[in-house]
Amino acid sequence: MIRLTHIDKRFGRSEVLRRVSVSAREGSVTALIGPSGAGKSTLLRCVNLLEIPDAGELVLGEEVVHFGSHPPGREAIRRVRRQTGMVFQNFQLFPHRTALGNVMEGLLVVQRWPQEKARAHAFELLDKVGLADKARSWPAQLSGGQQQRVAIARALASAPRVLLCDEPTSALDPELALEVVEVLTDLARDGTTMIIATHDLRLAAQVAGEVVVLEAGEVIESGPATALFNNPRHERTQRFIATLGHAHPSAGIGTISQRAS
Ligand code: ADP
Ligand code: MG
């Protein structure tokens, strides 16, 4: 279980998140959608404590962290980070490591696994994202979609409780985005818990069971994906979905259906 309760986050004078509460069951996929600047990335970064909220509470498995008068200690931050994996819009692979080296890195450095065990596990993960044959390739030799799949394998290496994805398809052409959507769909079927910030509605509709709509730092609507996309209650959600549907006709707003689960 992952639960954020009444999270406030300010940067200087600007209130970026206001009393935001979101919870996700183990094995569920939650999409955070909403206009640019809504606070989606900041909220994801509050889950792995790359940002420390000013108020509220985070529950991540056994870990309970309160924010407010004193910031969480380094040990608490480390325990939370170890339970999360993060995938970024622009992949952020190590350019001087092969695909395999990228996936092994955390296992060797953070988990201190022996080389052979790390190599074998990294191969399995690359196989899981369909890239066993690219293990020896350098990031520059891979397409954007392949690089993002390596980044997903790398994020999974430490067996995180939750995979956090920040706009995982946004830097990709549609057909490359599709291969990443397919990998995330497979992970969802396997029960990987994910929180995905995205304005790719095709991704949200295909992969997420739950959707949270953020606007200007507040949750304006949340609920099961099928209901929310087909029958949004909030007028601002309708408007947001309509804008994106127009910009990306392939999102097929009228025909969005939840993945068969
Ligand atoms: P989204 O991911 O929904 O586009 P963000 O979480 O990136 O939104 O940003 C929400 C707001 O917080 C924006 O107004 C952004 O400019 C601001 N913001 C994000 N990070 C910082 C930061 N490190 N310092 C100051 N302002 C920030
Ligand atoms: Mg963002």
Image: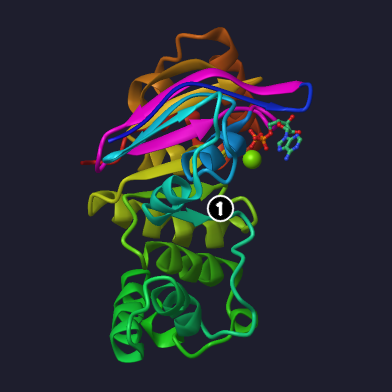
* Rendering quarter of residue 119: bottom left
**Residue sitting at 60 percent across and 79 percent down?**
139
Picture quadrant where residue 24 is located: top left
Q: Where is ligand 2, by quadrant?
A: top right
In this picture, which residue range is highlighted in magenta? 14-38
Rendered-image quadrant of the C terminus: top left
Q: Is residue 261 left or right of residue 143?
A: left
Residue 134 horizontal/vertical position (percent): 46, 85
Q: Nearer the viewer, residue 203 or 197?
A: 197
Q: Position of residue 14 (x, y in %)?
A: 76, 22
Q: Is residue 247 above or below residue 223?
A: below
Classify 98 as above or below 236: below
What residue sits right under mark 1 in the picture?
A: 169
Label 1 beta carbon less than 8 Å to ligand 2 = no
Residue at horizontal 59 percent and vertical 13 percent from the top: 236
Principal secondary structure, stretch drawn in magenta = strand
Q: Is residue 13 above or below residue 37?
A: above
Q: Residue furthest right?
A: 13
Where is residue 154 shown, x and y percent of the image?
Answer: 44, 68
**Can residue 200 be seen by looking at this rendering?**
no
Tell me, yes or no, if residue 112 can be seen here.
yes
